[in-house]
Image: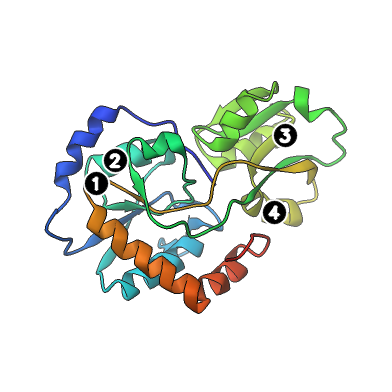
Amino acid sequence: MKSIVLGTTALVLSATFAMAAGHSVVRMGTEGAYPPYNFIDDNGEVAGFERELGDELCARAELKCEWVTNEWDSIIPNLLSGNYDTIIAGMSVTAERMEVIDFSEQYTLPDASAYATLSGFSGDLSGAVVAAQSSTIQASYIASSGATLLEFATPEETIAAVRSGEADAVLADKAYLEPIVVESSDMSFSGDDVYIGGGIGMGFRKSDAELREKFSAAIQEMKADGTLNVLIGEWLPTSGQF
């Protein structure tokens, strides 16, 4: 679950791009680079937990939706600029972010972050050099922990930094790291899981309260009938359920 350093709040004025009277097509903004939450499949299409969830939410809310990808570090500024209508990208609900955008009902519970290192690492993580994707809650956690933070633009670069010896460890969502650790012979988890941030929600311009409520109602409906837990079980098997 990620938290982003907010861009200039002046961009909130750009929210006038939103169609206050309603959205004929809702553009769903995601990163497309953070499996299993969202990624680009072999056909060049957005896939993953949030693709399946988002499509189901749009169907229940009777909305026509299309998917847009955007780099993580500018995902909030480009929402405010009107490049898409909502963010569905593994984004943790944080007080900092809520000063600029609004959030839907949360669709995951707070999840674990974990450290991954080269197999055989025996150092002290509190004094280690730790890689994290920039503008995330993991990066903020490392910066305040006493460890040395190395920030990278993409999650793939954080893994490469560990394998090259540039960093001792990477801190990221455990759901992201687990398949990498399981499928590799050179990396393993180290230390205890870390719980930081809140659950994940969809992000909206503050001017789009009606759209936010439509998606929140659909999320609540999926919680009530159990279909959200089914999706979580399929894509995020180590996560808590509602």
Residue occupying the point 35% across, 40% down: 76
Vertical order, 7 against 79 (above or below) = above
Lower sequence index among marks 2 and 1: 2
Disc 4 marks which amino acid? Glu
Q: Which residue is mark 3?
A: 169
Could you tell me which secondary element the residue under label 3 belongs to?
Answer: strand
Could you tell me which secondary element the residue under label 4 belongs to?
Answer: helix
- Quadrant placement of the C terminus: bottom right
Q: Which residue is mark 2?
A: 78
Q: Which residue is mark 1?
A: 83
Lower sequence index among marks 2 and 4: 2
Asked if the residue at tag 1 contacts the one at tag 4, i.e. Cβ–Cβ closer than 8 Å, the answer is no
Could you tell me which secondary element the residue under label 2 belongs to?
Answer: helix
Q: Which residue is mark 4?
A: 178
Asked if the residue at tag 1 contacts the one at tag 2, i.e. Cβ–Cβ closer than 8 Å, the answer is yes
**Label 4 packing within 10 angstroms: few (<14), some (14-19), many (20+):** some
> From this viewpoint, which residue is outermost toward the left?
21
Q: Position of residue 18 (x, y in %)?
A: 17, 49
Residue occupying the point 26% across, 59% down: 211
